[in-house]
Amino acid sequence: MRLFLLFLAAAGLAGCGTQGPASFSSAGTIDPQQFMAASSGAEASAYRIGPSDKLALTVFQVEELSFAEIFVDASGKLQLPLLGSVQAAGLTPAELSADLERRLGERYLRNPQVSVSVSEAASQKITVDGAVVKPGVYEMRGRTTLLQAVAMAEGGTRVADLKKVAVFRSVGGRPMIAVFDLAAIRRGQAPDPVVLGDDIVVVDTSRLNARYRDIIELLPGMAIFAYL
């Protein structure tokens, strides 16, 4: 029942239209790595900086204003030379870069070029559920792979089917799923995909394999990407 409710939450049924049910067969099969790569780019560009995030900030040809590591404080601000306190939380890296270029260009530099990237996203969390030892919500520290996410929950239980590990993600407001073979990843036979903040990871159990398709058949308007 818990897995069923997770599926419903990930699908966002309340906002679904009247489309027909989607299934593995109707949605087609693609390489999960293509799914992760495509959605990763979109999500990374939309990420909004939060308190305690670690950033890398570069002002082209101005070493005094460039930082390999700089932290957003608890109030969501950066403390910078010349500019003082600058709001960072709530902005994307691109928006913060543009804001700093504007501020520096108004008084200090001619045509400044500023680059901001997130080195460690302290405010991002991931949910790990299903057949894991300690299901729950975990804080991500920097780049996190699927293998690391499952390890946060102390790995799979004795009944876990590591060949069926699902990653739920909202891409452009649309719920999507990719299913990975974690056993193959552990053996080095498949790449270990990067997971993102707000992803939901569900480790299947051998006795629930048949229910997977039954539950997914009930989810209207959901795109399914399966690794079979």
Image (tube, rainbow, N blue to C red):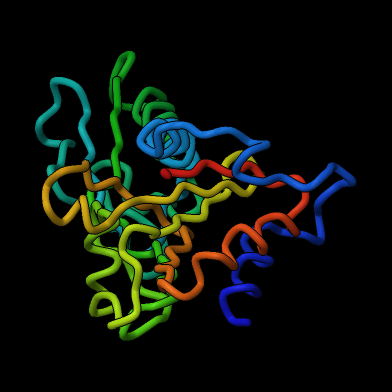
Q: Residue at x 23, y 47 (%)?
A: 192
Quarter where residue 89 is shown: bottom left
Q: In the rendered image, is residue 222 in sight?
A: yes
Q: Position of residue 212 (x, y in %)?
A: 57, 62
Quarter where residue 161 is shown: bottom left
Residue 87, relative to residue 109: is it above or below? below
Report whether 127 appears left or right of 6.
left
Q: Position of residue 103 (x, y in %)?
A: 40, 32
Q: Nearer the viewer, residue 69 or 167?
A: 167
Report whether 225 appears left or right of 216.
left
Residue 160, relative to residue 113: is it above or below? below
Q: Quadrant of the C terminus?
A: top left
In the current view of this chain or complex, which residue is farthest to the top? 111
Report whether 19 appears left or right of 226.
right
Q: Residue at x 28, y 82 (%)?
A: 158
Q: Quadrant of the N terminus?
A: bottom right
Quarter where residue 190 is shown: top left
Q: Nearer the viewer, residue 119 or 91?
A: 119
Residue 223, relative to residue 203: is it above or below? above
Q: Residue at x 89, y 46 (%)?
A: 18
Q: In the rendered image, is residue 96 in sight?
A: no
Q: Nearer the viewer, residue 44 or 92?
A: 44
Q: Position of residue 17 (x, y in %)?
A: 86, 47
Q: Position of residue 73 (x, y in %)?
A: 32, 64
Q: How many marks?
A: 0
Report whether 112 appears left or right of 173.
left
Q: Residue at x 63, y 39 (%)?
A: 25
Residue 156, relative to residue 48: is it above or below? below
